[in-house]
Image (cartoon, grey):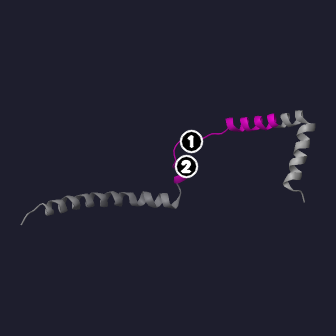
């Protein structure tokens, strides 16, 4: 079984014996990655990750109820504030 030192020794030997091949491999890999990077497409937003997920659908279903409850809480807060301002 090869150790890390053995692998590095072999790699060092290859680099010393065939520097042109190493440069060619590096440039080829760089070209492949550059072409792949140009072909990457991305869309804005998070809709493609959210729609169709159960948690997203549940949130959409409960949103109107939460808005209603927030309004009621605001109304209760105003009422409670008025009750505290009354001096007996």
Q: Quadrant of the N terminus?
A: bottom right
Examine the rendered structure and indicate whether residue 9 appears above or below residue 68: above
Residue 23: x and y in percent read 84, 34
Q: Position of residue 64 (x, y in %)?
A: 36, 57
Name the one closer to the observer, 14 or 39: 14
Image x and y of residue 30, in percent: 76, 36
**Spatial distance from mark 2 to mark 1, Cα to Cα?**
9 Å
Whether the magenta-drawn stretch holds residue 13 is answered as no
Report which quarter residue 11 is drawn in: top right
Q: Nearer the viewer, residue 88 or 49?
A: 88
Mark 2 near mark 1, Cβ–Cβ under 8 Å?
Answer: yes
> Of helix, strand and loop, which mostly describes the magenta segment?
helix
Q: Residue at x 35, y 61 (%)?
A: 65
Residue 7 pos. (x, y %) = 87, 51
If the image is split into quadrants, where does the C terminus sit? bottom left
* Label 1 Cα crowd, 10 Å radius (few <14 / some 14-19 / many 20+): few
Query: Which range of residues does the magenta coloring cover?
Result: 26-50
Please tell me the numbered disc located at residue 43. Answer: 1
Frontmost residue, 38 versus 82: 82
As drawn, 54 above or below 20: below
Residue at the limit of the structure toward the left, as seen here: 88
Residue 74 — which label?
Answer: none
Q: Which residue is at 63% across, 39% downward?
A: 41
- Name the N-terminal-most of marks 2 and 1: 1
User: What SS does tag 1 mark?
Assistant: loop
Q: Which residue is found at the position 89% from the left and 52% from the top?
A: 6
Residue placed at 30% from the left, 61% from the top? 69
Q: Which residue is mark 2?
A: 48
Which residue occupies the foreground of this view, 47 or 1?
Answer: 1
């Amino acid at each position: 079984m090869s150790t890390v030192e053995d692998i590095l020794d072999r790699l060092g030997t290859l680099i010393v014996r065939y520097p042109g091949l190493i440069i060619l491999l590096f440039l080829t890999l760089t070209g492949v990655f550059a072409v792949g990077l140009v072909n990457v497409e991305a869309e804005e937003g998070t809709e493609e990750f959210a729609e169709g997920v159960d948690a997203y659908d549940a949130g959409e279903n409960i949103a109107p109820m939460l808005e209603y409850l927030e309004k009621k809480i605001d109304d209760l807060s105003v009422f409670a504030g008025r009750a505290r301002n009354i001096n007996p």
